[in-house]
Amino acid sequence: MSKISLLQKYNIPGPRYTSYPTVPYWDEKGISTEDWVKTMQFSFNESNSAKGISIYIHLPFCESLCTFCACHKYITKRHELELPYIETVLKEWKLYLNLFPEKPILRELHLGGGTPTFFESNNLNYLIKGILDSVELHRDYEFSFEGHPNNTTKEHLQTLYDLGFTRVSFGVQDYAEKVQKAINRIQSFENVKNVTGWARNIGYTSISHDLIFGLPFQTVSNIIDTVKKTIELKPERISFYSYAHVPWVKGVGQRGFGDDDIPKNDYKRKLYEMGKHMLLNFGYVETGMDHFSLTTDSLFKAFDSASLHRNFMGYTTNNTQLMIGLGMSAISDSWYSFAQNEKSLSGYQERIDKKELPIIKGHLLTDEDLIIRRHILNIMCHFETSWLDDDLKFKDLTQVLVRLKELEDDGLVLITKHGLIVPKIARAFVRNICMAFDLRLVRNKPETQLFSMTV
């Protein structure tokens, strides 16, 4: 079958697998606070002294709405909201500190959003110091944050660097004016060049640029221009994401343009293939789905050593077992369970004021979930998995192999006696391969579209 027809065949709605089970398939009953605390403490005891823990802090404020964004955000220009929000986050962290049996060892800290650089430098300093004063640092700790090129200042970069941050990710998306207007994200190459240069001069060792293909009005020439400009600045990492058009989830925010304005099917994939070809030619290496890095970067080294991990923060070089999510809508992961915070700002703050963990929903993983999760992580992070060991075998493996047979016949997966390998030419179809393992999706296929398209 030709490559074009394979794209047509396999470009179907499917999860991105930042978790397994995926959020729509979490237990309808949710998770009790007691069960979350129990699994969180168990995971802490298993991993704190050896691996340490991760913390994700969700900083939700944005001054304007970017119409490509599917994150939980709060649109406002009221910067007086910053400090009360930080105080609430620190109160939430204190609730966790009271539940830990010993001082946490912090290995990874990430600031996401929203727009973390919406917050003033002194407020970010107050937030991070409030965390650092209560932890010990792992010898291999890594701190990172997401910055908006239009409002990230030298002061932001220096303040966070002085606190231990060495990684920063800048959202670029596309440099074409027509595309930027459609997604309401107007930023110049000059701004991106400035913040990238400032970060490098200050001492950041890993700078990432986030690009998106499949945006409204985007053309091949737009991709060529955007990637050329990106290569000129030579960030250590590049995320090259597919635009997820999910207006049924995010409402009017993703209906600022018509469906006919969005590149589809073979043309959309042509945008990706062009960008990927340029990146590979310049020396970037594909390191996980939709990610590229220079061989000097820690992301490549983690991929090369098969230690790359994936969670709600995306790909990470640190495979910590416990991740605590702080802030409105943040998701925590104990490996054995997931717990998501209240999604509204008022709901989140009210729960914290009552000295309650602000959990609104979650999922307690079954033994089967845990095995499937490991397989999906292996495929997403290493492009292979194995069921040679007994602890990776499961009852429905035979049915999974039946579902993989068509993918194998189409050359998208190599099945061995004890495992599978995803060939380089088939990495565009990783989500489809994972779907063959997704027992919850197979047993309860959605009647309406829940996910973005896989390819």
Image: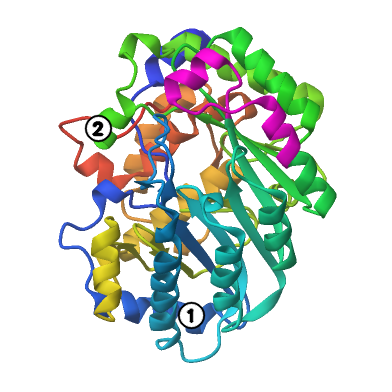
Nearest the viewer among 22 and 2 is: 22
Nearest the viewer among 310 and 250 is: 250
Specify the quadrant of the image occupied by residue 358. Answer: bottom left
- Does residue 185 show up magenta in the picture? yes
Q: Which residue is mark 2?
A: 251
Q: Position of residue 1 (x, y in %)?
A: 48, 9
Q: Amino acid at mark 1?
A: Phe
What numbered label is drawn on residue 252? none
Q: Is residue 83 above or below residue 147?
A: below
Q: Amino acid at mark 2?
A: Gly
* Secondary structure category for the residue under label 2: helix
Magenta region: 173-195
Q: CA distance from mark 1 to mark 2?
A: 38 Å
Specify the quadrant of the image occupied by residue 232. Answer: top right
Would residue 388 be visible to someone looking at this image? no
Q: Which residue is mark 1?
A: 44
* Secondary structure category for the residue under label 1: helix
Magenta stretch: helix, strand or loop mostly:
helix
At 19% from the left and 42% from the top, the residue drawn is 444
Q: Is residue 389 above or below residue 236?
A: below
Q: Is residue 85 above or below residue 450?
A: below
Q: Position of residue 242 (x, y in %)?
A: 49, 28
For marks 1 and 2 on the same chain, the one whose residue lies earlier in the sequence? 1
Q: Position of residue 419 (x, y in %)?
A: 53, 45
At 34% from the left and 57% from the top, the residue drawn is 329
Q: Is residue 237 above or below residue 345?
A: above
Question: Marks 2 and 1: in contact by CB < 8 Å?
Answer: no
- Quarter that holds the C terminus: top left
- Does residue 86 show up magenta in the picture? no
